[in-house]
Amino acid sequence: MPVPLYLCGIVDSVLDLAHAFVAECCLPVWGGVLADSQRCGRGQQRREWASPSGNIYAALRLPLTKPFASGAAALVVGALFAEAFAQQNIQLLLKWPNDLLLCSPSGNEARHAWTIGKVGGILLEERAGALIAGIGINVVSAPSRGDIRAGGLPAACLNDCSHINIQSKDALLDLWSCLVGSFIFCYRHWIRLGDTAWLTSAEQRLAWKGERVLLDDGERREEGVLSGLAASGGVRLVCNGVEKEFMHGNMFPLHCRLFC
């Protein structure tokens, strides 16, 4: 049975609207909301997410089962969207735990490509037994350097890549529909492969793997080499020869080689 996709104009928040549709029993699993813009878009820690027209502001209801029903859910969603974008010849990297970075199409492996900047983010919210993924993707515009919080990565939009030119609402809708189709196909493929299939894919697209990074979890700052991800959703760093796992925090590279 086809699932609904609600196309909206200006909304307060696609996440709030999606949960309202769930409460009215009209947003089944894989149903979605796509808005032109948001008045009160939000990211991690309820930071404001600027939402001008022309970008993707979407919500997608997910099944509340593994691997989504785990602490790794944001990573799983990020890895699935990275795979879906790759099907559109758009290369993204995962910045742990929930950001997406845009890359040039050069390089044999995604994480070795030239990174342009942060292009999107993912926010998961569960209410009343319904798990909703909110996703914001900069398509035609991105925040200026002055609008980015201190220490934040440079922002980018899809149209920064010379082979991408998405301008119309129809093209935006087509892109989102293709992304969701690929997302669901890849999810079902991973389920057949086993519980750790998502982890293999996520590590292949993990930004700065093998590089020195700084992780700030609000209580301490640790420097180390990013060795990979954990099935729990955490990140693994080798600090002074000892591998440690972190479950939350903000991570940055200790070099500028990957950025323009």
Image (cartoon, helix red, strand yellow):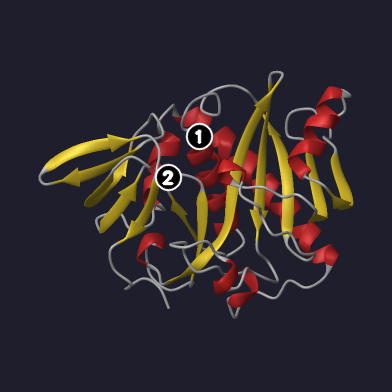
x, y percent for residue 153: 46, 64
Q: Quadrant of the N terminus?
A: top right
Quadrant in which residue 144 is drawn: bottom right
**Residue type (three-letter) at the residue carrying disc 2:** Ser
Work out which residue is located at the far top of the displayed protein and give it. Answer: 129
Q: Tell me if residue 85 comes above or below residue 69 in the rendering.
A: below
Please state which of residues 61 and 212 is positioned toward the viewer in this rendering: 212
Q: Could you tell me which residue is drawn at 85 percent across and 63 percent down?
A: 170
Q: Residue at x 47, y 61 (%)?
A: 152
- Element class at badge 2: helix
Q: Residue tagged by mark 2?
A: 201
Pinpoint residue 199: horizontal percent, then vertical percent. 40, 38
In the rendered view, would you say 115 is above or below 210? below
- Out of 191 and 204, give the one closest to the viewer: 204
Q: Position of residue 238 (x, y in %)?
A: 18, 45
Q: As shown in the figure, which amino acid type bears the numbered disc 1? A: Trp
Find residue 188 and report its horizontal and vertical position in percent: 58, 33
Q: CA distance from mark 1 to mark 2?
A: 9 Å
**Residue denoted by label 1:** 190
| Image quarter of the C terminus | bottom left
Extreme-bottom residue of the structure: 162
Residue 130 relative to residue 53: left or right: left
Report which quarter residue 186 is drawn in.
top right
Please state which of the two labelled residues, at mark 1 or mark 2, is closer to the viewer: 2
Describe residue 219's horizontal placement relative to residue 165 as left or right: left
- Mark 1 touching mark 2, by CB under 8 A? yes
